């Protein structure tokens, strides 16, 4: 409740200030990595709430935390201000000083509630249209995707031309996830100028884009022929690794060395050969070394493997889904997706059984030791290295 008290309007009492300082001291003095990380996150959130988005303020409490986490905390503090034009202006002012994660969070905060949240105020809509034009011109696909999603949520029909320009830029980058968001905006805003683009993608190219384009056309009431089924070695699977592409495979076990401890995995090369081979190939290159666990939902999953550290990164290229009989029980290791057949390097470990994931995400491994470590992972913990073995684990 301390951070909520600090977020309330009005002066901050000396007692609350002292409590906030005590959290920062506890973070520095904590004898465990887990305690230090948790205390630093709370202390940083307190600092963000006290500053409420101002560029000034004491941010020493945030030292040592991943920048992506600090940005999310800062935007959350501004978003906690009372709804209205002043809050909108504070979020827009903060936008320029933030990186992609913070910018996306600011856009999401401004889109929250949809058109009804604007209360019919022209100034609030004009502020969003101006900021969204800027965001859609960003060179970062994550920011463009957040802007496209917000444009659809807010029904900003003024953004037809910026959305079309964003599509052209993203198509050159082959930014799969952001293109899906732009296609969804085309459909939600019923942009007839985008129909030729959608009709082209609905019948060719990556399966995820075909599905997104078909959905956008359906939203505009435009019928399309069912997309042809592509052979497994086309499009998505092109360039995907085989077991022979990794040294001494097939790999049947791995140990994740993390800043919290070790997590031992049994891998399933027979049931998810491409996914296991991709994981092993990246591990052999040292791709995972030093990467964050950027997403942790207690009781659900811990997710890592993103070189950007914000959920938008990957190794380049995509993998087809390999749905198999393995279930998402406690400790299942799955490939994260941004739509069908979009696997890359991000993976997750479940904290409990989640049968709603069955048949939707490739299961390619199972925790056989160190589940308590996986459960204790926090945003900001890191993979230090991945150790592979061709022999099945004894456990």
Image: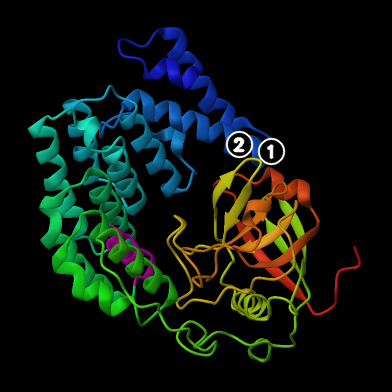
Relative to 54, residue 315 above or below: below
Q: Are marks 1 and 2 in contact (CB under 8 Å)?
A: yes
Relative to 73, residue 319 above or below: below
Part of the protein shown in magenta: 175-184
> Residue 294: x, y in percent?
52, 52
**Residue 34 part of the magenta-drawn span:** no
The answer to whether residue 189 is seen in the rendering is yes
Secondary structure found at label 1: loop
The C terminus, quarter of image? bottom right
Predominant secondary structure, magenta span:
helix
The residue shown at (24%, 36%) is: 91
**Residue 178 part of the magenta-drawn span:** yes
Which residue is identified by label 2?
36
> Based on the displayed image, in which of its 4 quarters is residue 327 positioned?
bottom right
Secondary structure found at label 2: helix
Which residue is identified by label 1?
32
Relative to 26, residue 351 above or below: below
């Amino acid at each position: 409740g301390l951070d909520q008290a600090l977020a309330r309007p009005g002066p901050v009492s000396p007692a609350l200030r002292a409590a906030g300082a005590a959290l920062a001291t506890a973070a520095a003095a904590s004898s465990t990595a887990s305690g230090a990380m948790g205390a630093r996150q709370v202390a940083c959130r307190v600092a963000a709430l006290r500053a409420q988005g101002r560029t000034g303020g004491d941010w020493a409490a945030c030292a040592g935390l991943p920048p992506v986490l600090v940005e999310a905390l800062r935007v959350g503090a501004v978003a906690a201000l009372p709804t209205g034009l002043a809050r909108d202006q504070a979020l827009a002012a903060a936008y320029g000083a933030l990186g992609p994660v913070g910018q996306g969070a600011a856009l999401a905060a401004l889109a929250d509630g949809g058109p009804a949240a604007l209360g019919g105020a022209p100034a609030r809509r004009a502020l969003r249209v101006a900021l969204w034009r800027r965001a859609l011109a960003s060179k970062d696909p994550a920011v463009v995707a957040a802007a496209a999603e917000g444009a659809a949520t807010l029904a900003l029909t003024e953004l037809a031309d910026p959305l079309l320009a964003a599509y052209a830029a993203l198509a050159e980058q082959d930014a799969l996830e952001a293109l899906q968001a732009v296609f969804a905006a085309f459909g939600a805003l019923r942009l007839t100028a985008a129909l030729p683009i959608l009709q082209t993608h609905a019948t060719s190219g990556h399966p995820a884009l075909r599905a997104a384009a078909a959905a956008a056309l359906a939203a505009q009431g435009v019928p399309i022929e069912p997309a042809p089924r592509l052979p497994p070695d086309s499009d998505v699977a092109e360039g995907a690794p085989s077991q022979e592409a990794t040294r001494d495979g097939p790999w049947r076990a791995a140990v994740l060395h993390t800043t919290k401890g070790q997590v031992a995995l049994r891998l399933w090369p027979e049931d998810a050969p491409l996914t296991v081979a991709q994981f092993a190939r990246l591990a052999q290159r040292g791709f995972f070394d030093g990467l964050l666990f950027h997403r942790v939902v207690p009781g659900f999953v811990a997710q890592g493997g993103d070189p950007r550290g914000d959920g938008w990164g990957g190794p380049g290229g995509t993998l087809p889904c390999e749905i198999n009989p393995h279930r998402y029980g406690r400790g299942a290791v799955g490939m994260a997706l941004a739509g069908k057949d979009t696997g890359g390097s991000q993976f997750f470990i479940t904290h409990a059984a989640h049968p709603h994931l069955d048949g939707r995400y490739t299961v390619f491994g199972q925790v056989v030791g160190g589940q308590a470590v996986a459960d204790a992972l926090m945003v900001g913990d890191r993979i230090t290295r991945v150790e592979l073995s061709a022999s099945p684990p004894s456990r």
